[in-house]
Every structure is written in structure tokens, then in C-alpha cells.
Image: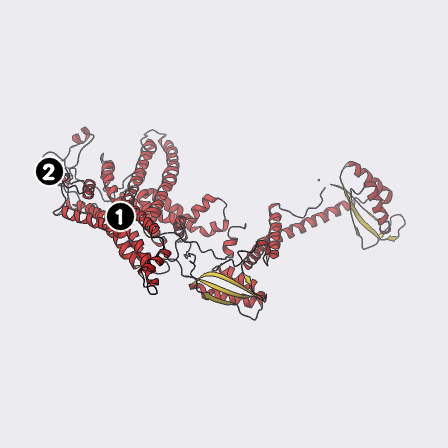
């Protein structure tokens, strides 16, 4: 089996990083995202680690950047929400003028001044004098009167023309502020990324050990074996970036610890892998159900949701998300519901496509059948002269007429594709579909469960557990095949052995199966299906019963054989052998656990088979809801013959479309999704999937930064 069908092979590796190159090497590993660091300082307080100060500085910078964005802090200039007075004054008078303002206004004004480079002509004397321009900001009428009086006494005259100059300066300052803020906003995302990358790197360095020379950091990482070359190359890049001349070393370690489980995915398979992981992370290297779920999950959903029209609507909605996925990813919506639907876009796409297929098989489109090939039924009456046809008077005078199934139809055999459209108007339509879909559900369920049991064989082969094959897999598959596999064969046999003429004499398969398990063959009301049926069924039940003790002793035998191989080579005394075996495992606990597992499996075969009948129940419920919605809503608009019927039909169609989306697509779709999920988690995966592992969580900048920035 390839890596697609089971988790990646993992290894524990030791990294030796030079102190000056450690930062760059960890940065390259974060860009690669293929190593999971182990904490080598579990007993050291987080505040006592070497790089705690660097982490704190990064956190402080992160907080400042977040505050800057959240509060939209910018450079605030004093506007006119303040009053001001502007003018010019001789340079030598500025110190005295400033002290006077401070004393009179008690420090409640803001004075800014600037020297005028070119000398100005005094209007009174005509001399060239050096002056300075000033502006005073204040609030309130009281300060305004004080400032004006001081200016009138100290300054020869105010300069009203400076108001226009001040406006020009303020406008230039505002433009400069906007340019600075725009430039900062463009680099804000880069600053966030750099700060958070630095914080992640220093946090990872705190997981490492430092040797006694303080020149080397030692780290332990879990990593996929297939990516070792990429990791080595990343370490070389980090060493070259740092300028270090000593290369970093990666050394694979031998360990008995259970590695984490890592399943490589892409944008198509990630949704199905998430369905499996929601049940439980797979044990290391056991069979991964996700590749099979890609087909079985949307198919079982479609069996319950089979409708060409509804499936086409679902396909179009999912196709929109798939085609525009790049643009939608760039928008990074905060709507959790939309993000959940978008993450499962490929699942929804396959569910829609499969629903169209099963809708064709059911010949169901918005509760109506499509007359693609015409009907295969003949209109010849069931009773009456041979060859006689119904007249118009017969059709008008009888609301219900019965067709003869024994009369050959147009095709002379099964309908070419799907179900004959004549059943859409038949009064016994529900009875016919009940029988068909119930048997179909049993067939699909048994096949699905047998396939799940068959997958357990690959786990036993990979983990080299031959006893689990002979005392586990073989009894389980034989038990299920001898009872429920036989039931499926009876269904197919009954379909082929009886025709229209003999169908009235066909016995009930349910009664047959119950009598088979109870060894009750004296029931005269239920005829036998074939010659030698009693002997074959008794043999099958005995084989199934013989499989139970085999399953019961598999776990109790396995630890004994494993322990005996390791101790009997050294210990020859039987008493001491039993003593050492008791040290290895508790026989009673294992026996009780295996007994529970055996009972659960045997009873589960019955309950799980019955659980697949939800395929039948949900399919009929969906079809009936669709039919009720059509007859109660859409039929009203189509039956109108008045002049305003078109406008009424438009309103009714809008209402019909709204109810179709809300009830049949959303509610019924969610119901079918949850039932398909349960069938995979309980009825399918528990046959071979333990889900007792823990997930591989690599150090990756992509996962750290994902979804945390606004474009």
C-alpha cells in the first residue's frame, strides 16, 4: 500500500545547531513546515528559559502594532476643536515675550516659533530687521483675551496675511501625514509577519537544549522520512544565511516512542481527511480511510438525497466556489459558516454530482419523473378479452385502473435507465419504492461493511500480526458473509428467480432470515426459495457460531505468544514462565476486553445492517417532502387559468424556490450529510480504524500566520 492509503513514515531526529546559525536554521525550517519540535526542557519554567527576553520584546512589539491598527492611531495635529493667534516679533524680544505668556496664561498655551531667514523692512523706520514668526494655540475666551492683550503690547501689529500662510503649512503637513500613514499601512502586514515569525522562532529555540560550551543548541524533532533531504537542504540554507562556517547536523534516532500521525493532503483531499480526523486521529501507519471516503461518502449521501434537480443546484453552487476559490481565499471572510462551507467545497461538489446520478437512477427531478424513453408498460387491461384495449369511456369512468405486469411492454425487459416514469402517477408508487430502496440499502450496507472488514487485513499484514489474521480477520469476515452476505445473495436470487407471473408466490426474505437464525423450518406460510435451502442455511449458521470462539481468544492468545517468544529462550521452568507472563499482561483484563469486542462485533453486525436502512428512510423522506412541496405550492400556480396567472405564478415560483433551498437543499442536505457521516464513523471505520493516534503538528509559519492579517 502506498503512502496515500496510510500515514507517512516518521522518524525522530536530533539537530545540532551552532548558536550563531540557530536562528536562521529554525527560520528555514519554519518556512519548510515539515518538522515538529519536542520540548527538551519540560521541567524548566517558561520564564527561566534562555530566550524569554526576546520573546517578551516580540510580544510587546506585537501589542504595539495591534494597538496602532485597532485604535487607528495617527499623528494628530492641533486644528481650529483650538483658537490661535499668529504674528511676527523681533528675535531679541522672543525670550521676554515667551516668559510673559507663560506667567500670564499659567502655562495653558502652546507656542511655536521659527526664525525668518531673510531680513524684513521695518514699516516705521525703513531699517532691515531680523524677525521670527510665531503661533500661539489656546482654548477658551479668557485665554484668548489675555493672549491678544500681550500680543498688542509686545508686537507692533498682528499679521493677518499669516493666516493664509498658516493654512498652506497645515495643508502641506496634512498631505505629508497622509503619505506617511499610507506608506506605513503598506508595510504594516510585513511588520506583523516579521514580528510574529521572530516570536515563533525564539519560542521554538526555548524548546532546545544548550550544551555546556554554550556554542551549540540541541533539538529533537519528528519529521517525515520522505522529507529528510528537504530538511537537510533547509539547514544548509540557514547556515549559509547566518555566515557560519560550521554546518548543522541532522542525526536520525532510534526510539520506541509512538510517532505522530501525518497524512499529506491537498486542497481536494483535505476536506475528506478532516471528516476522518473529526472521528479520531489515526494510529501511526494504520490504514487511512480518507481515500475511500472520497467515493463512498458522497455516494451514500446521494443515495439519501437522490434528485436530479436538487443535485444540479448543489453542483452549481459548489462549482461557483471551486472556480472562484482564488479570489474568495484572498478576501479572507470572517464568517465562520461561509468558511466551513468553503472548506468543504469539493465535498459538496462530489455530493451534488453523485446526487444527479442517483436522481437519474430514481428518475426523480423536483419530485417529477422524466419520460426519457417512454413507458415500458402496456395499456392492456389486467382482466378482460386478450388483446382488448381501454377505450376513452373506460379511462374517463375509472379514476384508478390496474395494469397487468405479465403483459410484455415496449422494451420486453427492464427499463433502459432508472425507473419507469409510469410509477410517478401510480397509486402504489410508495409501496414499490419502499421495497426497492429497502433492499438496495441492505445491499449497499453489507458491501460497505465487508469492505471495511477487508481493510483490517492490510493492517494485520503491515503490523505483522498473523494471529490477528487467523483468529480475527478470517472469523469476522466469515461471520458477516455467512449471515448477511447470504442475505444479499437471497435478494439477488429472488429478483432473478421470480417474474410477473410467479411474483405473487414469492416468500418474504425477512421471515426467511429470521427463521434461518432460529432454525425454524416448520413455518408453512413461508415457502422455500430453492432446493437444499435448509441444509445450506443450517451449515451457514453453524459456521457463523463457530467463528465466535475464534474471535474470543484472539487477544488472549496473542500476548501469550509474544511474551513466550521473549522469555522461553531464557526460562525453561514452566512455573517461572507463567510468572514472567503475568508480569507482561493481565490475562483477565485482556479476556474481558476481547469478550466485549466480540459481543460488540456480533451484535453490531445486526445493528449496523439495520442502521443502513436510514438510506431508505432518508431517500423516501426527501422524495415525499419534494412531492408535497410541489403539490402544495407549485401546483397552485400551474393550475391557474386566469389572465393574471402569469404574475401569480411568478410569485408562487419565488416562494417555491425559497422553500426548496431552505428545506430541501439546506435542511435535508444537512440531515443526509450527518447520516452519511455516522455511517462512515460507526458502521464503516470501526471495522478497521482505531483512531488512537495523535496528530503531527509541524513548526510552520504558514499555519502560524494563516488568517491573521487583513489585506
Q: Position of residue 118 (x, y in %)?
A: 81, 55
* Whether residue 16 is situated above or below residue 710 in the rendered picture: below
Residue 196 drawn at (x, y percent):
56, 54
**The residue positioned farthest toward the bottom in the image shown:** 245
- 681 sits to left or right of 440: right
Label 1 and label 2: CA atoms lie apart by 45 Å
Q: Nearer the viewer, residue 138 or 651?
A: 138
Residue at the extreme left of the image, as rendered? 385
Q: What residue did someone put label 1 on?
A: 446
Q: Which one is earlier in the sequence, the residue at label 1 or at label 2?
A: 2
Does the residue at mark 1 contact the one at mark 2 (Cβ under 8 Å)? no
2 over 640 or under it: above or below: below
Side (left or right) of 251 relative to 395 = right
The tag on residue 387 is 2
Quarter location, residue 619: top left
Given residues 192 and 478, the one toward you in this image is 478
Q: How many marks?
A: 2
Secondary structure, mark 2, is loop
Q: Is residue 141 visible?
A: yes
- The residue lying toward the viewer, choosing from 411 and 67, is 67
**Residue depicted at 45% across the width and 45% down the height:** 338
The answer, for residue 406, to whether it is visible in the render is: no
Mark 1 is surrounded, within 10 Å at the Cα level, by few (under 14), some (14 to 19) or many (20 or more) other residues, namely: many
Q: Residue 136 placed where, x, y %? A: 78, 44
- Dot in front, 1 or 2: 1
Residue 259 horizontal/vertical position (percent): 43, 58
Amino acid at each position: 500500500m502506498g503512502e496515500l492509503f496510510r500515514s507517512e513514515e516518521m522518524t525522530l531526529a536530533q539537530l545540532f545547531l551552532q548558536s550563531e546559525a540557530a536562528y536562521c536554521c529554525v527560520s528555514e525550517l519554519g518556512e519548510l513546515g515539515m518538522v515538529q519540535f519536542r520540548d527538551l526542557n519540560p521541567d524548566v519554567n517558561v520564564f527561566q528559559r534562555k530566550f524569554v527576553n526576546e520573546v517578551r520584546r516580540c510580544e510587546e512589539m506585537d501589542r504595539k502594532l495591534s494597538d496602532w491598527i485597532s485604535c487607528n492611531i495617527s499623528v494628530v495635529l492641533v486644528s481650529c476643536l483650538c483658537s490661535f493667534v499668529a504674528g511676527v516679533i523681533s528675535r531679541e524680544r522672543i525670550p521676554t515675550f515667551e516668559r510673559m505668556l507663560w506667567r500670564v496664561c499659567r502655562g495653558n498655551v502652546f507656542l511655536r516659533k521659527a526664525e525668518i531667514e531673510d531680513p524684513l523692512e521695518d514699516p516705521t523706520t525703513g531699517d532691515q530687521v531680523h524677525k521670527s514668526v510665531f503661533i500661539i494655540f489656546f482654548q477658551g475666551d479668557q485665554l484668548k483675551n489675555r493672549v491678544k492683550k500681550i500680543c498688542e503690547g509686545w508686537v507692533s501689529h498682528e499679521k493677518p496675511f499669516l493666516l493664509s500662510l498658516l493654512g498652506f503649512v497645515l495643508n502641506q503637513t496634512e498631505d505629508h501625514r497622509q503619505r506617511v500613514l499610507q506608506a506605513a499601512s503598506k508595510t504594516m502586514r510585513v511588520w506583523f509577519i516579521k514580528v510574529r515569525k521572530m516570536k515563533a522562532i525564539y519560542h521554538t529555540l526555548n524548546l532546545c537544549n544548550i550544551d555546556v560550551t554554550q556554542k551549540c543548541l540541541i533539538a529533537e524533532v519528528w519529521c517525515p522520512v520522505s522529507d529528510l533531504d528537504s530538511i537537510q537542504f533547509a539547514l544548509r540554507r540557514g547556515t549559509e544565511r547566518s555566515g557560519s562556517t560550521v554546518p548543522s547536523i541532522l542525526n536520525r534516532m532510534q526510539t520506541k516512542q509512538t510517532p505522530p500521525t501525518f497524512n499529506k493532503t491537498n486542497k481536494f483531499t483535505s476536506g475528506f481527511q478532516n471528516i476522518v480526523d473529526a472521528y479520531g486521529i489515526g494510529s501511526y501507519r494504520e490504514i487511512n480511510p480518507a481515500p475511500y471516503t472520497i467515493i463512498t461518502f458522497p455516494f451514500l449521501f446521494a443515495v439519501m438525497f437522490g434528485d436530479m434537480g436538487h443535485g444540479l443546484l448543489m453542483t452549481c453552487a459548489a462549482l461557483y466556489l471551486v472556480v472562484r476559490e482564488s479570489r474568495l481565499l484572498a478576501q479572507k471572510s470572517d464568517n465562520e459558516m461561509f468558511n466551513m462551507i468553503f472548506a468543504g467545497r469539493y465535498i459538496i461538489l462530489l455530493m451534488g454530482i453523485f446526487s444527479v446520478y442517483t436522481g437519474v437512477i430514481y428518475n426523480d427531478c423536483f419530485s417529477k419523473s422524466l419520460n426519457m424513453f417512454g413507458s415500458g408498460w402496456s395499456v392492456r387491461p389486467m382482466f378482460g378479452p386478450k388483446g382488448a384495449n381501454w377505450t376513452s369511456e373506460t379511462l374517463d369512468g375509472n379514476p384508478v385502473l390496474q395494469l397487468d405486469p405479465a403483459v410484455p411492454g415496449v422494451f420486453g425487459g427492464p427499463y433502459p435507465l432508472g425507473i419507469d416514469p409510469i410509477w410517478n402517477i401510480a397509486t402504489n408508487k410508495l409501496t414499490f419504492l419502499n421495497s426497492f430502496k429497502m433492499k438496495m440499502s441492505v445491499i449497499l450496507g453489507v458491501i460497505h461493511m465487508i469492505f471495511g472488514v477487508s481493510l483490517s487485513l492490510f493492517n494485520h499484514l503491515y503490523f505483522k500480526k498473523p494471529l490477528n489474521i487467523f483468529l480475527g480477520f478470517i472469523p469476522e469476515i466469515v461471520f458477516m458473509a455467512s449471515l448477511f452476505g447470504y442475505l444479499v445473495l437471497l435478494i439477488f436470487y429472488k429478483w432473478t428467480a421470480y417474474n410477473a407471473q410467479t411474483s405473487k408466490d414469492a416468500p418474504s426474505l425477512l421471515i426467511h432470515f429470521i427463521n434461518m437464525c432460529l432454525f425454524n423450518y416448520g413455518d408453512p406460510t413461508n415457502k422455500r426459495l430453492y432446493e437444499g435451502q435448509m441444509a445450506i442455511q443450517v451449515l451457514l449458521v453453524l459456521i457463523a457460531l463457530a467463528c465466535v470462539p475464534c474471535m474470543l481468544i484472539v487477544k488472549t492468545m496473542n500476548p501469550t505468544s509474544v511474551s513466550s517468544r521473549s522469555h522461553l529462550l531464557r526460562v525453561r521452568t514452566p512455573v517461572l514462565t507463567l510468572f514472567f507472563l503475568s508480569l507482561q499482561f493481565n490475562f483477565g483484563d485482556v479476556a474481558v476486553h476481547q469478550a466485549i469486542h466480540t459481543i460488540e462485533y456480533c451484535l453490531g453486525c445486526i445493528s449496523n445492517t439495520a442502521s443502513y436502512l436510514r438510506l431508505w428512510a432518508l431517500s423516501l423522506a426527501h422524495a415525499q417532502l419534494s412531492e408535497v412541496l410541489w403539490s402544495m405550492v407549485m401546483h397552485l400556480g400551474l393550475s391557474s387559468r386566469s389572465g393574471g396567472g402569469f404574475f401569480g405564478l411568478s410569485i408562487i415560483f419565488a416562494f417555491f424556490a425559497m422553500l426548496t433551498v431552505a428545506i430541501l437543499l439546506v435542511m435535508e442536505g444537512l440531515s443526509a450529510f450527518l447520516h452519511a457521516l455516522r455511517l462512515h464513523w460507526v458502521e464503516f471505520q470501526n471495522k478497521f480504524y482505531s483512531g488512537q493516534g495523535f496528530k503531527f503538528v509541524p513548526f510552520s509559519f504558514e499555519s502560524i500566520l494563516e488568517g491573521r492579517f487583513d489585506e
